[in-house]
Image: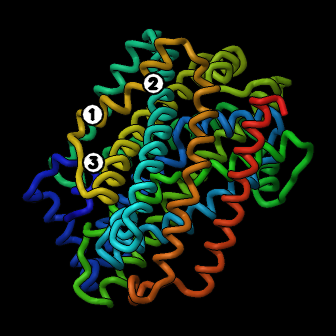
Amino acid sequence: MNSMDTSSAEIHPNPPYKVDKTIEAARASLSGQRKGIRALLPFLGPAFVASIAYIDPGNFATNIQGGSQFGYKMLWVVVVANLMAMLLQNMSAKLGIATGKNLSELCRDHFPKWLSYTMWVISEFAAMATDLAEFLGATLGLNLLFGIPMLYATFLTGIATYLILMLDRYGFRPLEKFIAGFALMIGGCYIVETFLSKPDLGQVVYHSVVPWLGNADSIMLAVGVIGATVMPHAIYLHSSLTQNRIVPRNDEERIKIYKFNTKEVIIALSFAGFVNLAMMYMAASVFNGKGHTEVADIQSAYHTLTPLLGSAAASVFLVSLLCSGISSSVVGTMAGQVIMQGFVGFSIPLWLRRVITMLPTIIIVALGVDPTQTLIISQVILSIVLPAPIIALIYFTRKKEIMGVLVNSKKVTVLSIISAILILGLNLFLIYQTFADFLHL
């Protein structure tokens, strides 16, 4: 089953000629006929799709709060979180290349049925929580940018994401290009915001590499940034995007494909890291630098940007939010299909999954629930679910009999375990703190 078979139950049985051209170009790269950047181009796609999970609306809220409250001082947290994300996403991509299966399929093959089904259920909740945050972000973008009522905006978002998902009928390449286009548009928006906000570049560089932790609020924010950065659905999805995209014919090709994919992960996740840094230093320059340290959510950021930098800057901010919400919602739906197909061996039609995952957002909007609180709750759900895919990923990628020549080196295994302990520990702290605040403990 090819990689996109796992992301949709309605996939083309015979890939059209454009997909064949990509595979032919990849074969030419593997044989040494294509050199330099031309050799890398056929392998670009999967990591850019997965990277959308790292610039979703949840990141907007966290980064804006960090920049407005603490200025440039929390930038190093974004860098650390991004480095850990690179490591884990690269391991996920490698798993698909080495085995021809995705993470959820391997869990079904190697774990007891009760465990596999349990992981499926909690992973579905994670996918829905992810889609809730992403869907809500796109809805907010439409509401603030065009004045469309929130309830109508949810339906427009649902239609837009479904139409984008239908590109999958034409092979993996059109959908990859479309998602990458959204990522580039988000990046372009933050290049514009960088020029408009005029951050102190010396402070940006310094605080990106020099750790700082001040009071309890800054520690809690660091927990939120790191603990909620690595997305469970992105780990599941990335392995499916590489599992049979370019099928290796021998171990030598497996190694070459993995090296190309490592380069792509570095490029795509560095790009996502820049966007996250830009979100935070824009907030640091505009909000913290001008005394607006109370800005902690997307709506107040938009309304505060308008008088400070003008309507153009505020509109660019909303365009980036809209692109982020729509593209990450597409990726979340793809991940949901991967999770279901992998763990239990069947999928539902994309239109039905789109409707099901829309319902929580529609209910929340109809009830008038605070969007920021909803984003926080969704991040807590993701924190609860996150241990399962990380532990499973490390377990499989360190086993020689499963990975073959692409088995983890001892250094990678140690680094991944350290990252996992840090992420999981911070997630537990985030969960405890959230419930403690809720229960006034």
Give residue 287's position: percent from left, percent from top.
Answer: 77, 28
In the rendered image, the residue lying farthest to the front is 114
CB within 8 Å, label 1 to label 3: no
Left or right: 370 as drawn, with respect to 211: left
CB within 8 Å, label 2 to label 3: no
Check disc 3 and report the residue beneath it: 175
Residue type at the position of mark 1: Tyr
Check disc 1 and report the residue beneath it: 162
Q: Earlier in the sequence, mark 2 or mark 3?
A: 3
Disc 2/disc 3 C-alpha distance (Å): 24 Å
Q: Residues within 10 Å of mark 1 (few under 14, many from 20)?
A: many
Disc 1/disc 3 C-alpha distance (Å): 12 Å
Residue type at the position of mark 2: Thr
Give residue 66's position: percent from left, percent from top.
Answer: 75, 39
Q: Nearer the viewer, mark 1 or mark 3?
A: 1
Give residue 52's position: percent from left, percent from top.
Answer: 46, 47
Q: Residues within 10 Å of mark 2 (few under 14, many from 20)?
A: many
Looking at the rendered structure, the secondary structure element under dot 3 is helix
Above or below: residue 297 compared with residue 249:
above
Check disc 2 and report the residue beneath it: 361
The residue depicted at 72 percent of the width and 58 percent of the height is: 425
Looking at the rendered structure, the secondary structure element under dot 2 is helix
In the rendered image, the residue lying farthest to the right is 215
On residue 100, which mark appears?
A: none
Residue type at the position of mark 3: Leu
Q: Earlier in the sequence, mark 1 or mark 2?
A: 1
Disc 1/disc 2 C-alpha distance (Å): 16 Å
Give residue 250's position: percent from left, percent from top.
Answer: 26, 89
Quarter of the rendering occupied by the N terminus: bottom left
